[in-house]
Image (tube, grey):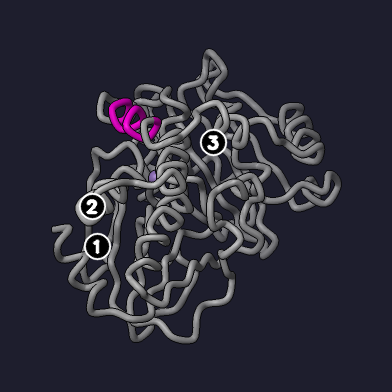
């Protein structure tokens, strides 16, 4: 399978590494980990993401500054990372081949080559295996990117997808020069005041249902305006809901600038949120999923979501 990837890369000249809209550390980590090898191969490589700006907390990742928000003029191969569907890339179809590297069960197999591993804790683990099939060693810069995806997708080794392979690979990455405390500090201890203020508004306004088993919270365009927070400053809010002792299902609703709603779902043990997300046209994992909705009325949307849940 990995040979196919390298064969197609060999035949291609203008390669775009793409991460999904509102990229997280896994998607970005994949693209940035892949970049140096393709450069070394003499390829014309672009790092692209349709979201602008990309969350600043990832600026410590090597080559982050090379990320562009305008799609390159020339592209004969697109490599997509950590993305379940083409529509989450934020681009139009073009005259290029696609390699789709992902670990979401809901993946729509939109690539000419699809490298999927649903048991991989992060997509960066898949990238790690692909890079190892080509290179004799992994550089520190690549290891930092791979490790970042791994700790982010496992919630620093706390989520249900944390397994022995995750720890084994983390250990290997440390042998390539990763310093875990440095990455933790970069990801978790550089909050802006605006983000903290947005968190405060959110904490004061969320609600509980079904004896506290369901938590629902939202942030509005006005909340962002009032605090000066960026959209990526709200990524952690759904976890605040899930972290409550009584909560099994957390529902986080973000009002987008274009008027649509973005819904993030998290669960602890019982509710399969990927099923709910799929029903509403989204996707994700069993314990973390999401979808977008054109609904105008938040409360009727919440009602519809809750109808899908038996608690
Ligand atoms: Mn991922």
Residue span colored magenta: 166-174
Residue at 23% from the left image edge and 74% from the top image edge: 10
Q: Which of disc 1 and disc 3 is earlier in sequence?
A: 1
Q: Secondary structure at mark 2?
A: strand
Q: Nearer the viewer, residue 26 or 63?
A: 63
Q: Residue furthest top?
A: 245
Residue at 54% from the left image edge and 58% from the top image edge: 63
The main secondary structure of the magenta stretch is helix
Residue placed under numbered mark 1 in the picture: 109
Residue at 32% from the left image edge and 69% from the top image edge: 41
Q: Is residue 188 left or right of residue 247?
A: right
Per the model, the C-alpha gap separating discs 3 and 1 is 28 Å
Label 3 with label 1: CB-CB less than 8 Å: no
Q: Quadrant of ligand 1?
A: top left
Specify the quadrant of the image occupied by residue 94. Answer: bottom left
Q: Position of residue 233 (x, y in %)?
A: 68, 43
Per the model, the C-alpha gap separating discs 1 and 2 is 9 Å
Residue placed under numbered mark 2 in the picture: 116
Label 1 Cα neighbours within 10 Å, binned few <14 / some 14-19 / many ≥20: some
Label 1 with label 2: CB-CB less than 8 Å: yes
């Amino acid at each position: 399978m990995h040979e196919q990837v390298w064969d197609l890369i060999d035949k291609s000249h203008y390669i775009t590494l793409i991460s999904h809209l509102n990229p997280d550390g896994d998607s970005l980590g994949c693209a940035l980990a892949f970049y140096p090898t393709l450069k070394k191969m003499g390829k014309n490589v672009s790092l692209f993401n349709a979201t602008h700006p990309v969350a600043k907390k990832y600026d410590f990742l090597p080559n982050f500054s090379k990320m562009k928000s305008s799609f390159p003029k020339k592209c004969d191969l697109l490599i997509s990372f950590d993305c379940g569907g083409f529509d989450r890339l934020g681009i139009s179809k073009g005259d290029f081949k696609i390699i789709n590297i992902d670990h979401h069960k809901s993946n729509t197999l939109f690539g000419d080559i699809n490298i999927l591993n649903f048991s991989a804790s992060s997509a960066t683990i898949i990238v790690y295996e692909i890079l190892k099939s080509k290179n004799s060693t992994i550089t520190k810069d690549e290891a930092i990117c791979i490790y970042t995806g791994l700790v982010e997708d496992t919630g620093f080794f706390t989520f249900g997808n944390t397994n022995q392979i995750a720890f084994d690979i983390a250990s290997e990455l440390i042998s390539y020069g990763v310093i875990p405390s440095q990455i933790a500090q970069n990801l978790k201890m550089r909050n802006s005041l605006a983000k903290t203020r947005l968190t405060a508004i959110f904490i004061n306004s969320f609600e509980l249902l079904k004896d506290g088993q369901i938590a629902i919270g939202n942030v509005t365009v006005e909340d962002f305006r009032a605090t000066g927070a960026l959209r990526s400053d709200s990524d952690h809010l759904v976890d605040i809901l899930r972290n409550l002792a009584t909560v099994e299902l957390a529902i986080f609703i973000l009002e987008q600038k274009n008027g649509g709603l973005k819904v993030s779902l998290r669960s602890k043990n019982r509710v399969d949120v990927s099923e709910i997300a799929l029903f509403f046209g989204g996707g994700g994992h069993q314990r973390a999923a999401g979808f977008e909705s054109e609904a105008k009325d938040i409360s009727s949307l919440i009602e519809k979501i809750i109808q899908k849940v038996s608690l």
